[in-house]
């Protein structure tokens, strides 16, 4: 415990130091990684949208390179971000699951990014970089005790953290209707009533002359009914206080968070990090809360978009991107900073509020968030600006992955990839420097939880890209392109359709996957045989690891609940410093 306290003191101290000006320009590049939340690839101008205004993101693409076949390793937050941070398919770290809890559902859950995983931040930190993350984490917090912070960003190589250790969701805005867990209370309320019926019946029997008076049985039924009711009502009723918090390093500074301030705070913290570290190599990961519901925008952007509150939120995020890029350029860091922009997965088609869609648009690509095989769930924007290295206004139309940022950053930061584990990402440096014409990825495997839904084969000699679907979600209602009954498509069981033989599409000629190649086609058997062989070899590399999102770990555990105060009375606001308006 003493060593832990000492380390926390060191990291907090380093995070607050402004390093002095030196005459030496360091040769290592800085990294600014910008990740949107739930943004659809069709939501920004440079990827085809002509009604939502995103001039700053478009300018970034104009000054750099667009990755037009950029793919997330998972179609939902927690596993996709785990893959991004580690360069590995999320099932390798136990960060993917096929059941109801495909992402971390509680801040007080014990699951999270395992301590033995090595993030790119940890490698760069060891190589002299100042590393910071601002915004959303959603990779867990505690393991065994409240405050052990085994999954905390500072335990994974970041010197500084400011933001949400969990994720933004609708109950973080109290006036928003509570729909995030809407499918839980209705079922649990029914179960509570069913369980309570015997208790009520026994009480009626006791105080009438209808029969015997089983006092002990009655007391047990009443207590069981009460405990069951409290077990779901308490966590669901207090999620605003228990999940919607803001931390600065290891300290809770807002509980619950002031959601109206977060845009200002994220910008201010980003600017301050850049100012503090402008004279040394740094890595800054800005993990936006935009554009996840409840879509809270500042007054400047409210009502300005042609696409309602969602468009307002996208345009505000674009402003934030521009503000952070300007901070880099105005400090004279433009020529020595690689800036990367992406989203964690596709837009959420089924997300609605008052019968209005408030999720993203995925352009010509079928499907959306939660769907691992269909392109709309995993195709994301990718933009890299690296002045004087990457030619401006260029396109890399090759299969790339969010996992590729890991080896790219490690290589450019002077680190070495871990040799005790499989790294699935491939360095983008040869493509960025025009030293290679083709991506190193021959196959990409698209998992929904632990179920392999689809495989992409990139024929490097011809440039042809095939995709085989082994499972696809069953859409509801019939004719829809989404799972509007469950709000998020499921991965297995009665919710999916198995395909034997697989569905096969020639994606290089059919990007919307609308023209299925028939088994009678002379190419079908050869392509599927090649993909099946790759799947067999890939599965040999998958080992059994503890499941971080299983029911036993991904549930509310009151003894792990972060609390600014005396549990269960958790509330405080220590972030009373004036926020400089940058909007």
Image (spheres, rainbow, N blue to C red):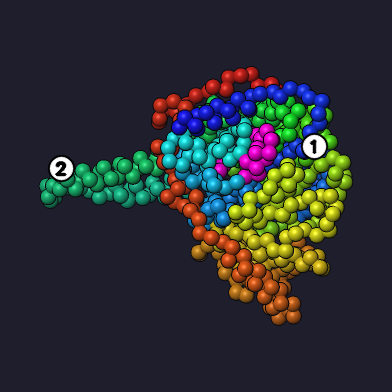
Q: Does residue 347 sit above or below 141 in this rendering?
A: below
Helix, strand or loop for disc 1: loop
At x 35% / y 40%, what residue is drawn?
A: 230
Q: Using the image, tell me which numbered label, if any, was put on residue 446.
A: none
Instruction: Give the residues in magenta.
Output: 119-139
- The percent position of residue 300, horizontal first and vertical second, equals 72, 28
Q: Using the image, tell me which numbered label, if any, was put on residue 27.
A: 1
Question: Is residue 485 visible in the rendered structure shown here?
Answer: no
Report the residue marked by disc 2. Answer: 207
Quadrant for the C terminus, please: top right
Q: Residues within 10 Å of mark 2 (few under 14, many from 20)?
A: few
Q: Are marks 1 and 2 in contact (CB under 8 Å)?
A: no
Quadrant for the N terminus, please: top left
Distance of label 1 from label 2 (alpha carbons): 84 Å
At x 65% / y 48%, what residue is drawn?
A: 84
Is 214 in the magenta?
no
């Amino acid at each position: 415990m003493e060593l832990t306290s000492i380390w926390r003191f060191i990291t907090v101290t380093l995070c607050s130091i402004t390093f002095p000006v030196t005459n030496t320009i360091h040769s290592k590049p800085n990294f600014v990684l910008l990740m949107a939340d739930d943004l659809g690839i069709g939501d920004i101008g440079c990827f085809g949208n002509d009604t939502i205004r995103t001039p700053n993101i478009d300018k970034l693409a104009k000054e750099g390179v667009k990755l037009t076949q950029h793919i997330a390793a998972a179609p939902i937050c927690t596993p996709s971000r785990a893959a991004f941070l580690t360069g590995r398919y999320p099932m390798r770290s136990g960060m993917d699951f096929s059941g109801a809890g495909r992402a971390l559902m509680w801040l007080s859950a014990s699951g999270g990014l395992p301590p033995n995983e090595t993030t790119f931040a940890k490698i760069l930190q060891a190589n002299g970089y100042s590393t910071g993350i601002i915004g959303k984490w959603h990779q867990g917090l505690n393991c065994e005790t409240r405050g052990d912070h085994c999954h905390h960003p500072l335990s994974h190589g970041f010197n500084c953290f400011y933001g949400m250790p969990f994720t933004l969701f609708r109950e973080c805005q109290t006036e928003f209707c509570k729909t995030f867990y809407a499918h839980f209370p209705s079922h649990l309320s029914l179960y509570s009533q069913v369980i309570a019926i015997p208790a009520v019946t026994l009480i009626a029997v006791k105080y009438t002359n209808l029969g015997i008076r089983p006092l002990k049985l009655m007391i047990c039924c009443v207590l069981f009914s009460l405990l069951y009711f409290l077990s779901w009502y308490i966590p669901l009723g207090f999620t605003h206080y228990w999940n919607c918090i803001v931390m600065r390093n290891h300290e809770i500074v807002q509980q619950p968070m002031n959601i109206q301030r977060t845009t200002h705070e994220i910008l201010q913290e980003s600017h301050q990090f850049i100012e503090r570290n402008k004279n040394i190599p740094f890595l800054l990961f800005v993990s936006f809360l935009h554009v996840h519901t409840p879509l809270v925008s500042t007054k400047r952007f409210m009502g300005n978009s042609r696409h309602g509150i969602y468009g307002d939120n996208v345009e505000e995020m674009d402003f934030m991107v521009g503000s952070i890029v300007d901070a880099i350029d105005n400090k004279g860091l433009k020529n020595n900073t690689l800036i990367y922009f992406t989203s964690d997965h596709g837009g959420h088609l089924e997300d609605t509020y008052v019968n209005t869609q408030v999720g993203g648009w995925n352009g010509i690509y079928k499907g959306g968030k939660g769907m691992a095989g269909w392109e709309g769930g995993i195709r994301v924007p990718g933009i890299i600006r690296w002045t004087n290295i990457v030619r401006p206004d260029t396109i890399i139309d090759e299969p790339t992955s969010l996992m590729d940022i890991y080896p790219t950053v490690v290589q450019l930061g002077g680190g070495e990839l871990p040799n005790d584990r499989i790294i699935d990402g491939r360095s983008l440096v040869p493509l960025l420097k025009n030293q290679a014409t083709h991506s190193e990825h021959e196959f990409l495997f698209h998992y929904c939880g632990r179920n392999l839904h689809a495989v992409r084969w990139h024929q490097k000699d011809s440039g042809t890209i095939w995709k085989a679907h082994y499972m696809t979600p069953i859409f509801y209602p019939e004719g829809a392109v989404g799972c509007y009954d469950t709000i998020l498509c499921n991965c297995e069981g009665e919710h999916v359709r198995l395909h034997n033989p697989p569905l096969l599409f020639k994606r290089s000629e059919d990007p919307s996957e609308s023209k299925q190649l028939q088994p009678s086609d002379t190419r079908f058997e050869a392509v599927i045989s090649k993909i099946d062989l790759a799947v067999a070899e890939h599965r040999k590399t998958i080992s059994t690891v503890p499941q971080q999102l299983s029911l036993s770990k991904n549930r509310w555990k009151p003894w792990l609940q972060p609390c600014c105060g005396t549990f269960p009375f958790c509330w405080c606001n220590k972030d009373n410093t004036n926020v400089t308006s940058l909007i």
